């Protein structure tokens, strides 16, 4: 593996910006998308439970329906790819069993050796006091995946717009999520900036490093 050069990383972090106008004619190549979508799947999550589904909306008709539900933000229809981040509203034994099974299979373990781990997760997120706030917990996990996606895209010189400016309940209806246990929390448009997107030339507005990163 080749370590990515510090300067290259820093330049790409500065290169990324919230792209407001995408060039509809420019599509992410399949081999690039295959890597970028892995940044969602491989994202970290609490316990590794992955309480999410990422819906890649390919149907232009559905994207048209989502446009007015997204403050009319044109990246919904114009970006090469449009991903809706959904979270699992409640944690349950089925999901935890699926995770334990996947871990046992992947690592060649007897699932019985993971009984204590399962009990811990159940006691925390299914039957314990945190079960009350598990929806908030799951939403936080999806934002980790969002961050992973944005940074990976930047390193690949793919533009993105993270989007909270949408009506999640209306999205759930259009996407048929109602009653599935998964709910919309945010979305990301990804593709390539329009040449005239004026936001690309704006300087980044950030507090000083000494203000937000404190060494104690
Ligand atoms: C979770 C999240 C939701 C956002 N939602 C929107 C949005 O709906 N529309 C939009 O134009 N920008 C949205 N943004 C972009 C931010 O406004 C932008 O990231 C911020 O101003 C910093 O600018 P930069 O990303 O260009 O550095 C969102 C950003 C984040 C992280």
Image: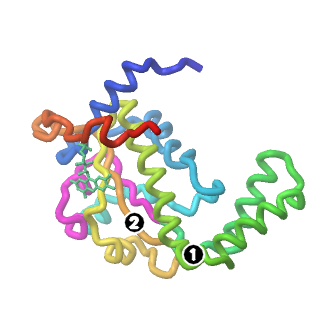
Most extreme residue toward the front, as rendered?
216
Spatial CA distance of label 2 from label 1 is 14 Å
**Viewport quadrant of the N terminus:** top right
Disc 1 secondary structure class: loop
Which element type, helix, strand or loop, lies under badge 2? strand
The mark that comes first in sequence, 2 or 1, is 1
Residue occupying the point 29% across, 64% down: 61
Q: Is residue 75 above or below residue 28?
A: below
Q: Residues within 10 Å of mark 1 (few under 14, many from 20)?
A: some
- In this image, 10 relative to 140: left or right? left
Residue 26 visible within the image? no
190 up-or-down from 92: above or below = above
Q: Position of residue 178 (x, y in %)?
A: 45, 79
Name the residue that disc number 1 marks: 90
Horizontal and vertical percent position of residue 11: 32, 24
Local crowd at mark 2 within 10 Å, few (<14), some, or many (≥20)?
many
Q: Which mark is residue 185?
A: 2
Which residue sits at x=57%, y=48%?
44
The residue shown at (44%, 18%) is 5
């Amino acid at each position: 593996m080749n370590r990515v050069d510090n300067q290259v990383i820093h330049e790409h972090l500065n290169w990324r910006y919230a792209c407001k106008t995408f060039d509809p004619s420019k599509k992410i190549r399949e081999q690039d998308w295959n890597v970028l979508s892995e940044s969602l799947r491989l994202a970290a999550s609490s316990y590794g439970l992955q309480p999410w589904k990422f819906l890649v909306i390919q149907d232009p008709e559905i994207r048209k329906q989502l446009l007015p539900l997204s403050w009319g933000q044109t990246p919904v229809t114009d970006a090469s790819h449009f991903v809706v981040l959904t979270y699992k509203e409640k944690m349950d034994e089925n999901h935890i069993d699926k995770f334990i099974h996947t871990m046992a299979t992947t690592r060649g373990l007897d699932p019985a050796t993971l009984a204590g781990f399962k009990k811990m997760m159940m006691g925390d997120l299914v039957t314990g006091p945190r079960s009350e706030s598990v929806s908030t917990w799951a939403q936080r996990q999806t934002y980790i995946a969002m961050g992973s996606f944005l940074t990976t895209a930047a390193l690949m010189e793919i533009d993105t717009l993270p989007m909270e400016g949408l009506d999640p309940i209306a999205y759930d209806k259009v996407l048929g999520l109602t009653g599935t246990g998964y709910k919309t929390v945010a979305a990301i448009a990804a593709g390539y900036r329009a040449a005239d997107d004026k936001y690309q030339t704006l300087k980044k507005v950030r507090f000083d490093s000494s203000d937000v990163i404190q060494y104690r």
